[in-house]
Image (cartoon, helix red, strand yellow):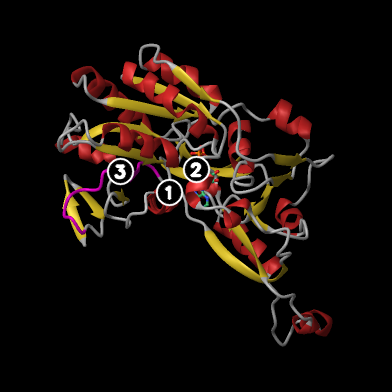
Amino acid sequence: MLTQEGGIFSVFKNRSLMPPRILLYLVNEVKSSITRKIPHLKKNKKKNLHESQVISVQQQRTKLPIYFVREELLQLIRENQVVVVVGETGSGKTTQLTQYLHEEYEFTTNGGGIVGCTQPRRVASVSVAKRVSEEMETELGDKVGYAIHGVLLRETLKDSDLEKYRVIVMDEAHERSLSTDVLFGILKKVVGRRRDFKLIVTSATLNAQKFSHFFGSAPIFQIPGRTFSVEVFYRNTPCEDYVEAASSTDPGYGDILIFMTGQDEIEEVRKLLILPIYSQLPSDLQAKIFQKAEDGARKCIVATNIAETSLTVDGIFHVIETGYSKVKVYNPRMGMDALQVFPVSRASADQRAGRAGRTGPGKCYRLYSESAYQDEMLPSPVWF
Ligand SMILES: Nc1ncnc2c1ncn2[C@@H]1O[C@H](COP(=O)(O)OP(=O)(O)OP(=O)(O)O)[C@@H](O)[C@H]1O
């Protein structure tokens, strides 16, 4: 069923006709990505067996770092209107915190007790909502929903106090954009007007202090530990062609996530990875298609930075990281925005590495040197 709520067009299969209790919102999205299955890559089934495949979803939840500090964190939230939460990638900030808050406030509010969680990317809103509904053993659209056609920001135009929300989680707040900055200003006012309203800001470590300061020295809660280790490899020298270098980096087993800056490069990688056949192709290259593919295909995803945060793709062991992304920059001469390629920040590189090691130990191959990471990359993204 499609419902129109408060100016937001939400995709809900809402059996009870009540709005879901946990809502994931899209606040800002920049680009798209392409996902491909590459059938000729070899899959080593044994090595590819992730922990998530052998233990239940509920057991997985009790192994996440946030689980061990649940009560401590909720106590801090009870005592403060705004709390900044910092934790390693995969510690459970998105999927677990929303559920803890739902459990905490489910019975204490009548009616307007929705926990809203903002996401910078569409793909994350959808996939996290699905995951949370699975964990809560409910159908998507029943207790858990997502809204991608509208943004929370737009909802504030109709209801400036966001009355139906008990808690808003500004997830991945370090992924700043104009929308999130405006929303921060609005939420600060809501916090001042509504004593029962809670705001949780999750962020990469480096920006936590700034957010805390903006909200009048809000306490910062650090979730200790990480779920699985990610081994990071660097090149000794910078590579001349990262598209080619990424395409020829095959760790030999396990699913792979490759980061590229945009659709053109993604298409190039796809061409390099998929075997072509046409009459003008030299016969030795044509012959390659007759080589037998191993049993069990391996998945290779080539994505832009839309896959950088919040996403868990089960089975991804390896991340190949080019160190670049496209950023929307205003060009005053042309009087319009343009996408330009820039080196990523250390915070983004760490987020990318964090896409491995979500459901098992992982590896990240950085196509640049360690000194480039340490000395040349900015600590966090700069917004133009
Ligand atoms: N779709 C999924 N399939 C399998 N496991 C998942 C899925 N989504 C989440 N998980 C598990 O839950 C863990 C916590 O994910 P969550 O998104 O809550 O972490 P996070 O702290 O918000 O990380 P990040 O900041 O990188 O988004 C993951 O590391 C993974 O083990």
Query: Viewed as shown, does residue 303 lie left or right of 157?
Result: right
Circles 2, 1 touching at the beta carbon (< 8 Å): no
Query: Viewed as shown, does residue 78 lie left or right of 259?
Result: left
The dot on residue 128 is 1
The dot on residue 22 is 3
- Marks 2/1: CA distance? 14 Å
- Marks 1/3: CA distance? 11 Å
Q: Is label 2 in a helix, a strand or a loop?
A: helix
Q: Earlier in the sequence, mark 2 or mark 1?
A: 2
Locate residue 166, reporting x and y percent.
Answer: 24, 31
Residue 26 in magenta?
Answer: yes
Locate residue 186, reporting x and y percent.
Answer: 26, 26
The dot on residue 61 is 2
Locate residue 21, reporting x and y percent.
Answer: 26, 43
Ligand 1 contact, mark 1 (Cβ < 8 Å): yes
Q: Is residue 339 visible?
A: no
Residue 206 figure quarter: top right
Q: Identify whether 125 is placed above or below 36.
A: above
Circles 2, 3 touching at the beta carbon (< 8 Å): no
Q: For mark 1, does the 10 Å Cα neighbourhood hold few (<14), some (14 to 19), or many (20 or more) residues? A: many
Query: Viewed as shown, does residue 143 lie left or right of 355?
Result: left
Ligand 1 contact, mark 2 (Cβ < 8 Å): yes
Write down the region rendered in magenta: 15-28
Instruction: Kindly report the secondary structure that dominates the magenta region of the rendered protein.
Output: loop
